[in-house]
Each structure stands twice: as C-alpha cells, then as structure tokens.
Amino acid sequence: MRQTFQIVEKIPDEFGAGAKAPADASIIAERCGFVPICVSRRSATGACGRWFSRLAWFLQSFSRVLRMPMGAVVFVQYPMHYLRSKMGVMFLEMLWWIRKVRFVTLLHDINQLRGLGSCVDDALLRRMLALSAVVVAHNESMISWLNQNGVPSEKLVNLGIFDYLASDCAAEEGQGDFRCVTLAGNLGLWGKCPFVRQLRDVTDVVWELYGAGFDPDKSGGPNVHFNGCYPAGEVVRHLTKGFGLIWDGDSVDTCSGGWGEYLRYNNPHKMSMYLAAGLPVIIWDEAAQASFVEKYKVGFTVGSLREIGARLHSMDRGEYMAYEDNARRLAQRIRGGCFLCDALSAAVKILAC
C-alpha cells in the first residue's frame, strides 16, 4: 500500500473559522492515516529580511519533506500561508520532481471566484492544479467551474460539505423558541456581511448575532440581539436558537457583491458550524449548497431575507423538529470528520487505479 503523508502548517487564529477549517482538515487526515510533516512559518520586516526569511523557511522545510519515501501520496491544503508565493509552489514542484510524490489537494478558497484574484493568484492556482494528482473540490458547482478551466473530471472529488470537529452540540432537542434566526461570524459592516446593518429593518424576524465587529449604533435594533464573540472551537456550544443563516453580501434582498456571488460556488464553513451545533439552516436559494440543504432536509432556502418571517410564522414545532432531527443526524458525521475522510478515501482509490 502506498504511504500517505500531509504537509501541515499551524495558523495562530483561534477566533476565526479561517484557522479552524485547515486545522480540522489536518486532524481528520491524520486520523485517516496521513502522517503529518510540519513546516515552520517565519516572519521578518523589510524586503531583504522577508526574502531571507522565505529562503530559510524553504531550506528548513524542504529538508524535512525530503524524508518522504519515493512515490508517496501527500495531502496538501490550498491556499495556505506558504503557498501564497512562487517559492511555496516551487517547494512542492521540487518535491514532486525529486521524490515523485502524488499530491491530493483540498481547495479551501478560490479568490478568483469572489472577485479577489490577482495575476499572481491565477498563476499560483494554475500551477497548483496542474501539480495535483487529485483535487478535492467543495461541490458540483465548483467542479463544473474547474472543468471549464481545464481540470478533468477524473482527478476531481466532491467534498460535499466541510467537517467541523466538535465534541458535542449546543442545545437539547426542541429547546426554546424556534422562530428566530442565528447569524455567527464576522459582523463588520465592510467585511463579508455588510447586510447586517439592514437586519433591524426586517422587523418580523428576531436576529440572534454572534461574532466580532458588531456595531450596536449602526446595526443594533429591538429585533437584533448581540450575544458576544467566541473562539471558533467553542461557538457551537452557544448556538441554541432557531435556524442558522448562510448569507453574504451587502443586501438583505439577495446575495450580491463578490462575497455574495461566491456562495454560488463555495461550501461556507459557517454552514458546517451551524449543523455541527445541531441547528437547521436557512440559505440563499441560488447558493451552491442550497441543493445540499434540500437533499438532507436540514432547512429551507429563500431568495430574500424578507421572506423568512412569513415562513417562520407559518411553521409549527413539528415541522421545525423534523428539520432539527435531520440536522442532528448530519451533525454526527460533520463533527466526526466523515466527509473529508470519505473524500480522501476516494482520492486514494483514484491513485491506486
């Protein structure tokens, strides 16, 4: 059997889901038999200092990964800090050339799909996709985009949804009022969700907010309740009410702008967080993950946040509990890392052919 490894980089950001997603993926991959090889991150000031820092990182890290056996399968995550430069991708290309390894790459984000891609991003992504023997993509929408950009279907694996490792979920079954909506994440007006400032205008819904960047003067209101900010690994224990909302952009009427459009392609880590907490969800009906929500019957879709109030007020507790039961069953798989483990198993089978 081919030996399996992974390249791991630590990210010191306990409050952001941006740190939790790759950290969880590393843990899950290790459980699935991918031996971790850590690469160190170095920082320095000044152009000269940064160049020498990157060179030192390259030499130190490369000496570690050269210990891999010839022909090993190596799991990497993209993008990571070390892959945001030409030297980082060159590091993997040299490993591929010298040790003949085969890369299985998990895509976390594609900046080009949210309007943030630069010429450097385009070049690095193309090199990374060409280098990968198997690419684990978020969903069928992202797979279709990758196909259109030259990645053949036979080297693509559908993740389905990101896992979210957690020991337990938040609330007891059926607890509290289900006719409210929870939103957790970056609540800053100019971040992913500037629509937050309009929530107080959707007066037939009670909004329960968690996260950094909330401004009560600009976003507060009698129907908007701010419940604090918690680290990504702890927040699931505090999400106890109603439905979790997956929505991005600058409007309550549709998901617009770069972040809103990105929902057409990505698997929001926020959705995994809600489901790991046992909350059913509400998602934009044009989002890539709308079909996932409908398939597993873990919530409902809307075209505008103004549709939610009527839907909630016409819902009885039995309907909500059906959604909640489905969410809790799915939560067992998400909290256990089953989706990535299945994807990695599928990737290894492809390479064995």
Image (tube, rainbow, N blue to C red):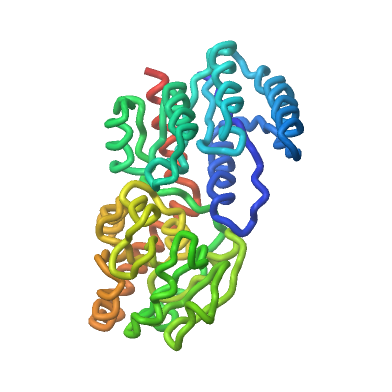
46 to the left or right of 136: right
* Rendered location of residue 143, percent (x, y): 31, 37
Q: Residue furthest front?
A: 47
Say if residue 171 shows up in the picture: no
Q: Residue furthest bottom?
A: 222
113 to the left or right of 226: left
Which image quarter: residue 51?
A: top right
Looking at the image, residue 138 lies above or below residue 175: above
* Rendered location of residue 165, percent (x, y): 54, 53
> Closer to the camera, 245 or 166?
245
Looking at the image, residue 22 lies above or below residue 39: below
Looking at the image, residue 195 lies above or below residue 82: below
Please report the residue visible at 33 percent of the width from the left and 43 percent of the height from the top: 139
* Rendered location of residue 85, percent (x, y): 58, 31
Q: Quadrant of the C terminus?
A: top left
* Rendered location of residue 247, percent (x, y): 37, 63
Please report the residue visible at 46 percent of the width from the left and 77 percent of the height from the top: 208
